[in-house]
Amino acid sequence: MNRRKICIVTGTRAEYGLLFRIMKEIQADDELELQLIATGMHLSPEFGLTYKQIEEDGFIIDEKIEMLLSSDTPVAIAKSMGIATLGFAEAFQRLKPDILVLLGDRFEIFSAAQTALVMRIPVAHISGGELTEGAIDESIRHSLTKMSHIHFTANEDYTRRVIQLGEQPDRVFNVGDTGVENIRKMTLLTKEELSVYYSWDLNKYFLITFHPATLESSMAEEQVKNLLFALNSFPDYKIIFTKSNADTDSRRINELIDEYTRSHPERVKSFFSLGQIRYLSTMKYCALVIGNSSSGIVEAPVFSKPTINIGDRQKGRLKADSIIDCPPTINDITEAIQLALSVEFQNGLNQLKLKYEGQTTSADIKDYLKKIDLSYIIKKKFYDINR
C-alpha cells in the first residue's frame, strides 16, 4: 500500500512547538509518511541551530533549506525569500509530497506555499483567518489562505473569515489551537525544576518576548528601549527574555536585550530558545507575560496569567480580558504593568473566558489530512458568501 506523504515545513522554534504533536500523530500512523523540511532560523548558529532539537525529539529531517542572509534589512529578507523558493523547488521535486502542511504567517512559509502552488502540490494551512495588523504577517497569512486548499482554523471567528476570503466551507475545519492543546496535554516542569535550570529563586519574575512590528519602519529600537526603561521601575522582579525571531530589525532588538542582560546579571536572563516544555513551564509560574508575541494572546490566558501586549503587532487578534493593550511608551508600559500586578486585576483572572481552546487538535488535523479526497482539490472555486 502506498502511504500518503505529508510534508511539514518548519522555520522557527515557536512554530515547531506548535507542529510537534501533529508530526507525532502523522509519524505514528502506518498509512501516512511524515516528510520534514527544516529551514530559516533552525539552521542558523545565530538563533541556536534549533534543528538539533528536532532531531533529538526523534524526527528525521528530510531536507534542510538554507535561506537566511547575514542581514535583517528588508532587502535581505526579500532576497532570503527568493533563495528559499529555489530550495523548496528542489526539495519538493525530490520528496514529491501528496500534501504540504504549513503553519502561520512567516516569510519562509510564504516561499514554500508559492512554490507548492506552481508545482501543483495541495497545501493545508494552519491558523488562517487571524489578524496581526502591525506586521507583514497579516498580508502573508491571508495570501497563504488563498494559496491553500485545506484550512485548519482556531475558532469560529477565524473560520468565518477564511470563508469570507472565498474559501469553500467544506474545506475549512475549526480544530482549535495547537498551542492550547500542548498546555492541556503536556507534562510541564515544576517550579523547583525550573529554579535549578535558571539557578534562580523563581518567586517573582516577568517573561518577555518582543518582535519587530514589521510595518513600522525603524521603530523597533525605540520601542525596546522604552520597554527596558519601564522595567527599571520593577527592581523586585526578575526578568526572562526569549529573543526576537529573524525579521527586519530583529538584530537590534536582540543586541539591546543582550546589553540589558549584561548590565543586570543578578535579575535578567535571555535565551534564543527555551524549547516548548521549558517555555510553557516558565509561563506557568511567571507574574506577567510582556511583549508582542502571539503566545501572550493565546497561551498565557490558559494559565490565567496577565499579558502586557505592547504596540500594534497583534492588533486585531481576539483577546481575553487578561490582556492589557498599551502603546509602546515608557509611561504606558509602566502603568500597564502596575495595573496587571494590582490585586483587583489579579482577582478578575479567576473567571477568565478563553478565546482559544484545543483538546484533540493534532489528531483531528491528522485525520483530515489522511481522509480528504485529493483527486479534485487542486482546482479551487471562489465561494461567494452573498449567495
Image (cartoon, rainbow, N blue to C red):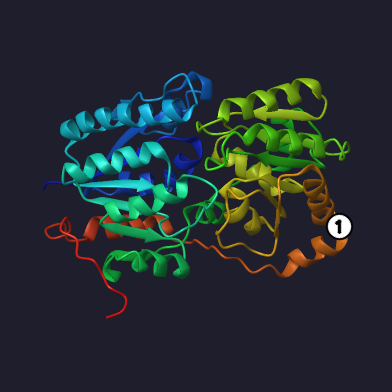
Question: Residue 331, position in %: x, y?
Answer: 82, 46
Query: Relative to 109, is 171 above or below?
Result: below
- Camera-nearest residue between 155 and 52: 155
Residue 204's image quarter?
top right
Which residue occupies 35% across, 49% down?
25
Q: Position of residue 23 (x, y in %)?
A: 36, 44
Left or right of residue 346, residue 380 in this image:
left
Q: Position of residue 228 (x, y in %)?
A: 76, 34
Taking the spot 80% from the left edge, 21% from the top edge, the residue there is: 263
- Name which residue type carries label 1: Ser
Q: Secondary structure at mark 1?
A: loop
Q: Is residue 98 visible?
A: yes
Q: Is residue 358 above or below residue 293?
A: below
Q: Position of residue 291 (x, y in %)?
A: 66, 44
- Which residue is depicted at the point 81% across and 25% down? 264
Task: Classify 10 Å Cα crowding around label 1: few (below 14), some (14-19), many (20 and above).
Answer: few
73 with respect to 265 (left or right): left
Q: Could you tell me if residue 60 is visible in this image?
A: no
- Name the residue that disc number 1 marks: 342
